[in-house]
Image (tube, grey):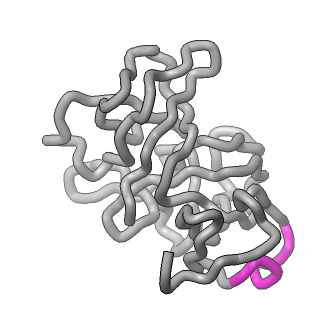
Amino acid sequence: MSGFPQTPGFGKAAYASSDTPEKLGTLGELASFDGVLHRLMQLHTVCVSDVIASGHVLYRTATANVVTNDRSEAVTDSANNYCGIAPQLTASVPESTATVTYYMWVQISGRATVVTNGDDDIVAGDLIIASGDGTCDSVAALSENAANFIGIAAAADVNASDTVVVDLRPV
């Protein structure tokens, strides 16, 4: 993607660290890894568990460039929709396991494997929304869920692992 730095040596940006963000870049910075857009973020002190896995849906918090997978800590809009980190309120997906307060590159566009709510009802082409603590679900229409929209299912969900491949909405 033109206009964004290509950071060498990170591969799929599968990196999380307790180091200062300056060792990775500038907090909030956008970068393209293998043609996929990422943002350098910090994981909130309050998450569903102390360690979150790759593929969890992350939500924006009241603190700039800090995200969580705990919906109760998430920022909501006037319609009480949970808001992701991007200007269009898209949720994001970490590509590596991270511990609370760690800094990490978070995927905000492109194709990603995302954790589902376990309903096993997603098929290719479904509209995908952020729906719970670190999870996504599908909806037929976006009327009341537009702010929670994160992308389109590229395939049916994988029942054994409660995941689905999603083309994340570009930001």
Q: Residue at x 56, y 72 (%)?
A: 65
Residue at the limit of the structure toward the left, as seen here? 143
Q: Quadrant of the C terminus?
A: bottom left
Rendered location of residue 126, percent (x, y): 31, 30
Query: Quadrant of the rendered structure where residue 158 is?
Result: top right
Q: Is residue 124 above or below residue 37?
A: above
Rendered location of residue 75, percent (x, y): 41, 58
Instruction: Decide if residue 73 is on the left or right side of residue 100.
Output: left
Instruction: Decide if residue 111 is on the left or right side of residue 100.
Output: left
Q: Nearer the viewer, residue 68 or 137?
A: 137
Q: Nearer the viewer, residue 102 or 63?
A: 102
Q: Is residue 68 above or below residue 154?
A: below
Q: Residue at x 44, y 34 (%)?
A: 136
- Specify the segment rendered in magenta: 18-25
Instruction: Decide if residue 112 is on the left or right side of residue 42.
Output: left
Q: Is residue 60 above or below residue 32?
A: above
Q: Residue at x 13, y 41 (%)?
A: 143
Rendered location of residue 73, percent (x, y): 51, 52
Query: Quadrant of the rendered structure where residue 53 is?
Result: top right
Q: Nearer the viewer, residue 89 or 70?
A: 89
Residue 24 is one of the magenta-drawn residues? yes
